[in-house]
Amino acid sequence: MFSLLALLVPAGGIAYLGAVSYRDQKGAVAAQIDRQHGAAAAIVARIDHAIVEALDAADRAATAGQLSPALGPLPGLGRYWFWIDADGRMRVPRTTPVAAVAAMAAMAAAADPALDRPALDRPASPNGRPNGRIEDYVRELSRRQDRAARLRAAQRAEACRGACGPQLAEAKRAYLALVTFDDTGADALLGLARVTARLGDLPRVRALLDELDRRFADRSFPKSGTATERVPVRLVTALLRAEAAGDRRAAALLSVAEAVLANHYAIDPIVGLGIVQRIRGELATALPDHLPQLDLEVESMRSQARAAAGLADDKEEVARSATETWRGRPAAKQPSRTLIYRRRADGSVIGIAVDPAMLALAAGHDAQDEVARNARPIVLAAGAVAAPELRTIQGTQMPLGEGLPHLQLALVNPMSDPDPLDEVVRHRERSHIVFTSALALMLGVGLLAMIRGAARARELAQLKSDFVSTVSHELKTPLTSIRMFAEMLQQGVAQGDAEKMHRYHGVIVQESERLGLLIANLLDYAQIERGTRRYTPTSVELVQLGRHAVSTFEALAQPKAARNPIVITVSPSAMTADVEVDRDVVVGAVLNLLANAVKYGGADKPIEVAIDSDGATASISVRDHGPGIPASEQARIFKEFYRTPEAYRSNVEGTGLGLALVKRHIEALGGSVEVASTVGEGATFTIKLPTFREVTA
Ligand code: ADP
């Protein structure tokens, strides 16, 4: 039963594994692909979310009104944001690191306290606005033209180089006459400040500049040589003030450069760049320590200028195609850059300029992205493939959404790392192999148990069939003799021959006893098997027991001619030993051993019976001088119905039941049976019994 289970369970297990594993494997692979696809879809959703957040942030910045340095670059995707206002003007915020600029401005201010001095107070200049009549307009126009001409004359006088005191004095006079007017005031004040500076009256220069600031803060001067690019008055005065700062000039100039870089003057980046570079040239020897930082700033401004210039090409298209929901398209100048933009409620357009790496980064990181070792998202142009050293993880390549049809996302990992799908298969294979080998092992064990069981069953069947034939033979032989001699007596064959009759009767009696003994043995065995054998132990003297067995055997044994001489030795310690046993059973056991000694020991060979005791254990051993028993057979001969091949070969009669009964009986009485034998020298069987009482003499 057990061996059958041991076979069926693992065999079933292997069959099950075989049947299900393929389906499971397919299932696991599909599940992994699903997981990979899900991770990529989640990343696309997060990028979408990041885009909306960046646009919202840009929107808020634009609503705040100015692309001022305070708004700075927005974080993440909003770093390069732009704004096309309702008038179609494109604005790009500064990308200069705000903290660095603030630190430098503070340093420059500390170097030049004059920068913070309050402006000098001057009476407000009269307003030259016309009063509305046509002749007034004409008059005003001619006055303005006249003033403009005088201003140009003053500027020409001022332009003189070298020692030109009279010209400067004339210029100063002319400027002074023009400062009060709204149209020429700013230029006249500026010219006056320049001339005063050349004349060396620095305090007066500062006063003039302060006035210029106060009256014309919202004006700007055309930059020399350009018609459209204008420089605000505040920047011009700041520059002149710095020029007039004496030994603090360098620090003051640096401070102005910083302010330009920080976009304090909200000027065109290109114009600002020109100014900063001019200042940088002047500072090269005065403040060399600050140049690297300044260069960094210039570089940042330059890139911003470039960004603005780059975006300029897209301005029309973006302004035209913007809708309320965001959309994206490659930038005209740099196709690797994507413009994402949407229309605001006021009609202006807000947008961000991003590149694929920024988009991939904007997704951030989530635990569920880790579908493979070192997996990371990349953004590619639609239709492009990842670099050859990267593996596109299956199921993760997907468009980046309706707004960005020209881009796609993929999750990749290095080719040197394993493919996650292979990993899944390999992992399953490993556990599969472990299960299968465990089951195969179980199957092996089960098979072994089955084979052993079958062998044992066959052995038993063989033994029983041997037993049946042996027993029938054993029964038949004495019966045949009995019947034959009885018939002979009946037919009167021995009529008158008293000696013959006596012999015939003797044979009949002896064979009947043999038959009786055999049947008694069989009944005994049946009782033991059923567990109904009962013993009646009594205290017996060991020596008496041994001698009784021997004499009984001698009395029962065959004719004197075939008798083997039996020698009994009794050790002194055995003389007083008693045992508590079922007497008849022990005598029967010794008789069995003696019968075997005669059967297998060879005719006429002496048999030695030794009775011994070591105090605790009493023993009766029977030794013959026959062929002996090989070591390999010594355990088996005590099994029921077992007979050695030698026994069959030598045609000795027997059932194979004798020794089995001896062993069972003696063990039931608390003793044991042992055999010692050397092939060719005979065998010694010893019955050992616990002594009942030890009487010392
Ligand atoms: P049986 O004698 O009826 O065959 P036993 O149980 O008495 O059965 O003995 C079992 C087997 O042990 C015998 O068949 C024989 O092969 C072997 N055997 C028993 N006694 C001896 C002995 N004294 N010498 C050699 N072989 C023996």
Image: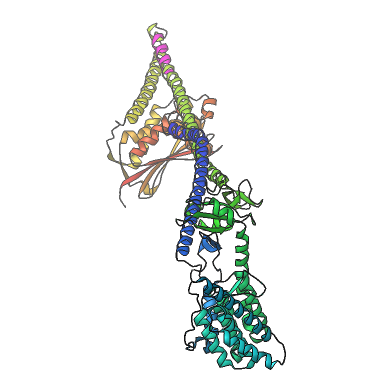
Mainly helix, strand or loop, the magenta region? helix
The magenta stretch is 477-487
Image position, residue 647 (x, y; %): 51, 28
373 sits to left or right of 621 = right
Q: Is residue 445 above or below residue 240?
A: above
- The quadrant holding residue 80 is bottom right
Give the image's coloring scheme: rainbow
Name the quadrant of the N terminus. Answer: top left
- The quadrant holding residue 580 is top left
Q: Nearer the viewer, residue 207 or 401?
A: 207
Q: Nearer the viewer, residue 410 or 80?
A: 80
Q: Is residue 384 above or below residue 623?
A: below
Residue at position x 52%, y 43% in the image: 33
Q: Nearer the viewer, residue 59 or 624?
A: 59
Q: Nearer the viewer, residue 109 or 140?
A: 140
Q: Residue furthest top?
A: 491
- The quadrant holding residue 622 is top left
**Is residue 481 a member of the stretch shown in magenta?**
yes
Q: Is residue 185 above or below residue 690?
A: below
